[in-house]
Amino acid sequence: MSTVLPRAAAPVPFGRSLRDGVRRLAEAAVTPLELGDVLDVFHPLRKGADLRGRIVSVTAETADAATLVIKPGKDWAGHVPGQYVRIGIDVDGVRLWRTYSLTHGPRADRCISITVKGIPDGVVSNHLVRKVRPGQMIQLGQAAGDFVLADPMPAKLLMVTAGSGITPVIGMLRGLFARSERITADIVVLHSALSRAEVIFGDELRQYAAEGRLRLVELHTDTHGMLDVDDLDTIVPDLAERVTYACGPVGLLDALEAHHEPKGLPLHIERFRAPMVANANDGQSGGTLSFTKSGTVVEADGATPILDAAESAGVLMPSGCRMGVCFGCVLPLREGAVRDLRNGQLTIAAPGDGVIIQTCISAAAGPCHIDN
């Protein structure tokens, strides 16, 4: 008969046991908080933490636009010029999320930048342009979006932008011109703004043109009027040979689609907002939004996205692109009806259903109970 002796546990390496002991001691010292909570205060940009960024500088571009340089946390995965990033900022005690294009190419300091134009009644945009200061922390998402240059890059490009629509394009240009080899592509930038003084990155664009890197066509609506896309063939005679990238107001982008598609011209578009149909509510007067977890009740009209109505009432809402693409805003509709602002389609939930809706492109079409 043989006896099997119990196997001794493998010795724990001294270094690991010491680290574990120090961590247990630290956790005991900060109870009832967790050690991560304390590290968030002293090392918020560390690897493994929720992705955040520290504002390094705020620089005015025009009277109502500013560039924010941000140092992201260690887990920032990088971006391709033309992409966007979600920014979370606390305004009056409520965390609000917005999406902004990244406006830089490669940076030796690993910082990122966004350029924000304040819009009338824009809670977040005006806060970022006028109130944030260096040193403040913000929440970050990873870069996303497919409004990027093709690889290999087309030999001829046309970039049509208006207002803040220049922001993803300036990122593309900076990325191109930062390359060690000189770019040989034929680039035309057609930019429209209210006036010469309102052209974001105006001096930089004009310098690129002076250096022969691109051809710049500026249209100032105070003197030239609005861009008529039917004039493109005159402004850019070789339009049919170019790949067009466009970003700007919905009206401009819709007009470009109507102009390019019948002719089979390649067109890449970046929309800051999803197109909404004018008669999406078909005369509906909206309804009462009841948020089951917070207990908040909001009266909303039939043309305002549920996301916007809720945030205006101080409800903390998940969000992302705010144009129906990323599904970062989805919540369960427990009961009621909502209308898709893009096409007028109704979604109805019976009591307890929990139908998933996108709050950024849905409006109330009667009383709604939303699980948030």
Image: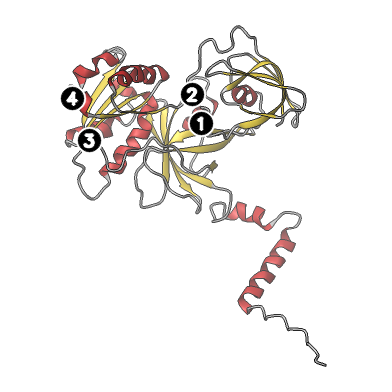
Residue 233 quadrant: top left
Mark toward the start of the polypeptide (3 vs 2): 3
Residue neighbourhood size for the residue with mark 2, other residues' Cα within 10 Å, grouped as few (<14), some (14–19), many (≥20): some
The three-letter amino acid code for the residue at tag 2 is Ala
The image quarter containing residue 369 is top right
Query: Which residue is more in the foreground, 136 or 147?
Result: 147
Three-letter amino acid code of the residue under disc 4: Asp
Q: Position of residue 362 (x, y in %)?
A: 60, 22
Instruction: State which tag comes first along the sequence, 1 or 3.
Output: 3
Q: CA distance from mark 4 to mark 2?
A: 30 Å
Mark in front: 3 vs 4: 4
Q: Name the spot of residue 62 as percent of width and height, x first.
A: 37, 27
Indicate which disc residue 325 carries: 1
Separation (CA) of disc 3 from disc 4: 21 Å
The image shows residue 44, relative to residue 185, as above or below, that is: below
**Disc nearest the viewer among 1 and 3:** 1
Q: Earlier in the sequence, mark 1 or mark 2?
A: 2
Mark pair 3, 2: CA separation: 32 Å
Reading the image, the residue beneath label 3 is: 208
Q: Amino acid at mark 1?
A: Val
Secondary structure at numbered mark 4: loop
SS class, disc 2: loop
Write down the residue under mark 4. Answer: 238
Label 3 vs label 2, nearer the camera: 2
Q: Residue 274 shows which numbered tag? A: 2
Labels 4 and 2: the sequence-earlier one: 4
Residue 14's place in the image compared with 76, above or below, is: below
Q: Are marks 1 and 2 in contact (CB under 8 Å)?
A: yes
